[in-house]
Image (cartoon, grey):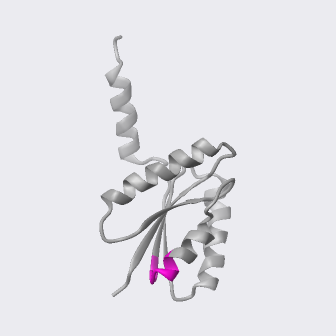
Amino acid sequence: MRKTGMIVLGHGSRRREVSLQFTAMVERVAREVSGAPVLPAFFSLGEPTLADQVRALALQGCDRIVVMQYFLYNGVHIEQDIPEMIAALREEFPGVEFVLQPTLQDDPALERLIVDRLLADAGR
């Protein structure tokens, strides 16, 4: 039976408070996900990195790692940079299955949130 670990991958920021807020959000999400560790990682401008967290999960015995790309749009990081990082990690961890989830682009749940927020203040 495979052991799954999860990583929420954000871009990162030079501002420490942004990194702390992202990490706190991932910790809240992790409390809602039972049965698998959920860790924050930063693509750029922050630590821990994606590679750091993959190594941490591998040390915990995870042989399947789900990477949720916490990005709004499919720019160059999504289309090129992150797939290259995942390819390198697949070479470093050949026994680990990597599942790369899509970004939030065109996600109906996000669109519903935007509609709900707009309607909450409509007519004011």
Q: Is residue 13 magenta?
A: no
Q: Which residue is painted at 63% across and 59% down in the image? A: 47
Residue drawn where x is 59% and y is 81% of the image: 90
Q: Residue at the spot x=58%, y=52% of the render?
A: 74
Q: Position of residue 26 (x, y in %)?
A: 45, 54
Q: Nearer the viewer, residue 81 or 89?
A: 89
The C terminus sits in image quarter: top left
Q: Which residues are magenta?
A: 57-64
| Residue 43 x/y as whole percent | 63, 59
Q: Quadrant of the N terminus?
A: bottom left
Q: Nearer the viewer, residue 91 or 37?
A: 37
Asked if 88 appears above or below 71 in the picture, the reply is below
Q: Position of residue 18 (x, y in %)?
A: 58, 43
Question: Looking at the image, how many numbered discs can be counted on the residues?
Answer: 0
**Which residue is more in the foreground, 65 or 15?**
15
> In this orientation, does residue 48 appear?
yes
Q: Position of residue 14 (x, y in %)?
A: 69, 45
Give the side of residue 64 with respect to residue 82, left or right. left
* Magenta region includes residue 59: yes
Residue beneath the point at 65% across and 55% down: 46
Image quadrant of residue 31? bottom left
Residue 72 appearing in the image: no
- Seen in the picture, residue 7 relative to 21 is either above or below; the reply is below
Say whether residue 8 is left or right of residue 18: left
